[in-house]
């Protein structure tokens, strides 16, 4: 989760005369748009930035090591055969056709036919690149076959990062799990079809299916896990705090006040303020500034001008935004933008290790 911080109450904010939020609602001054389910809205906003997708055709005996990928999420979908996955810390997970594994924080792990097989680093093995982001890996000793679709993705937007912080180190969905929803069975069947018998456009189909499966796996965990009712996720599900969070997420440029949000969710100012702080772990003003700065990081990475970012996030001047950003993040926005753009430039095209 994002850390709490002090708020500079002197930072001016711009009040737009009229705007359109990212759900398409035209927002007039003083009019609060309708609220949908806050948790569903957050899941719908999970923006996937696929860095690398791989269709692996493996034959016994085989083993691969998958290195830690900071700021990313690893996933594996088994479409044929089975294997042993060993997570960081030694946890061993048997997975078979129809199973999916997600490592939300991109930690080191390895996969093999057995625990005794050698596991070379996956990016050191030869791949057949169909594009800069999609490859085929053929590896192993020629025995029984296992097919796995794996990938590394980065999830954009602050809601995604907050959600990933709450997920377990390893998220496993077994194909034979009782009560599994039909959509998961159908998606995995379609994935198997596209990878076992590639047709025109299969690369695009597989990458899109991977993105959908990752989001659905996260949704599955949220629906099935009691801990999802706590913390930030619990706040999203709260009948009063959830809609207030959704208002902030949809319109970060608006100068939200405790009184305005309290009125929108039908509580008194004092009752709402206490409930919000208890559920979210920080007061409204702190959360609003925190959310704005997280959005600013994404916009800086996209190369937007600092003045434009300041306007989008409701600050009356570039200087006011820069002061708030440096106070919260610990560095000037220009420093963050330069670092993000340098990192993006370094990630263009497949490097010798094989990962774009």
Image (tube, rainbow, N blue to C red):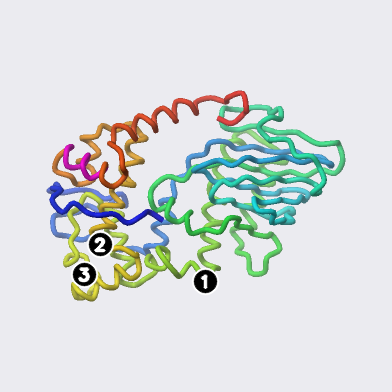
In magenta, the rendered stretch is: 318-325
Q: x%, y% of residue 68?
A: 59, 42
Taking depth in this image into account, of 81 and 51 the one nearest to the observer is: 51
Magenta stretch: residue 324 in it? yes
Q: x%, y% of residue 289?
A: 26, 52
Disc 1 packing (10 Å; few <14; some 14–19; many ≥20): few
Magenta stretch: residue 39 in it? no
The extreme right residue here reads 143
Disc 2 packing (10 Å; few <14; some 14–19; many ≥20): many
Residue 128 occupies quadrant:
top right
At x 60%, y 52%, the residue is: 102
Taking depth in this image into account, of 208 and 142 the one nearest to the observer is: 142
Is residue 195 at least partly visible in the picture?
A: yes
Q: CA distance from mark 1 to mark 2?
A: 26 Å
Q: x%, y% of residue 290?
A: 30, 52
Q: Which residue is mark 2?
A: 284
Dot placed on the residue nearer the N-terminal end, 1 or 3: 1
- Which is the main secondary structure of the residues drawn in magenta? helix
Q: Which residue is mark 3?
A: 262
At x 54%, y 68%, the residue is: 225
Residue 150 occupies quadrant:
top right
Disc 3 packing (10 Å; few <14; some 14–19; many ≥20): many
Q: For the residues carrying marks 1 and 2, which lies nearer the camera in this image?
A: 2
Disc 1 and disc 3 in contact, CB within 8 angstroms: no
Quadrant including the C terminus: top right
Disc 1 and disc 2 in contact, CB within 8 angstroms: no
Q: Which residue is mark 1?
A: 226
């Amino acid at each position: 989760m994002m850390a709490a911080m002090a708020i500079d109450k002197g930072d001016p904010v711009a009040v737009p005369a009229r705007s359109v939020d990212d759900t398409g609602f035209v927002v007039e001054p003083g009019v609060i748009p309708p609220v949908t389910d806050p948790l569903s809205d957050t899941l719908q906003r999970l923006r996937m930035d696929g860095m690398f997708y791989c269709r692996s055709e493996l034959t016994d005996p085989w083993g691969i090591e998958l290195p830690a990928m900071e700021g990313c999420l690893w996933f594996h979908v088994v479409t044929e055969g089975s294997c042993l996955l060993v997570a960081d810390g030694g946890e061993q997970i048997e997975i078979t056709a129809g199973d999916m594994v997600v490592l939300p924080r991109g930690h080191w792990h390895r996969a093999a036919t057995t625990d005794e097989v050698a596991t070379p680093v996956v990016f050191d093995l030869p791949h057949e690149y169909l594009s800069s982001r999609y490859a085929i890996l053929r590896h192993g000793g020629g025995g029984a076959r296992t097919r796995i679709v794996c990938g590394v993705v980065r999830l954009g937007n602050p809601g995604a990062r907050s959600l990933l912080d709450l997920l377990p180190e390893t998220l496993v969905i077994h194909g034979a799990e009782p009560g599994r929803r039909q959509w998961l069975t159908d998606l995995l069947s379609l994935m198997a079809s596209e990878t076992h018998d590639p047709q025109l456009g299969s690369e695009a189909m597989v990458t899109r299916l991977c993105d959908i499966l990752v989001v659905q796996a996260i949704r599955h965990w949220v629906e099935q896990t009691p801990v999802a009712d706590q913390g930030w996720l619990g706040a999203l599900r709260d009948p009063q705090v959830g809609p207030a969070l959704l208002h902030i997420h949809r319109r970060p440029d608006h100068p939200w006040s405790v009184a305005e949000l309290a009125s929108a969710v039908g509580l008194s100012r004092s009752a709402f303020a206490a409930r919000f702080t208890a559920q979210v772990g920080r007061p409204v003003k702190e959360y609003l500034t925190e959310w704005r700065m997280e959005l600013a990081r994404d916009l800086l990475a996209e190369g937007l001008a600092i003045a434009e970012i300041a306007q989008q996030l409701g600050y009356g001047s570039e200087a006011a935004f820069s002061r708030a950003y440096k106070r919260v993040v610990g560095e000037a926005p220009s420093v963050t933008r330069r670092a993000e753009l340098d990192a993006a430039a370094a990630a263009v095209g497949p490097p010798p290790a094989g990962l774009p």
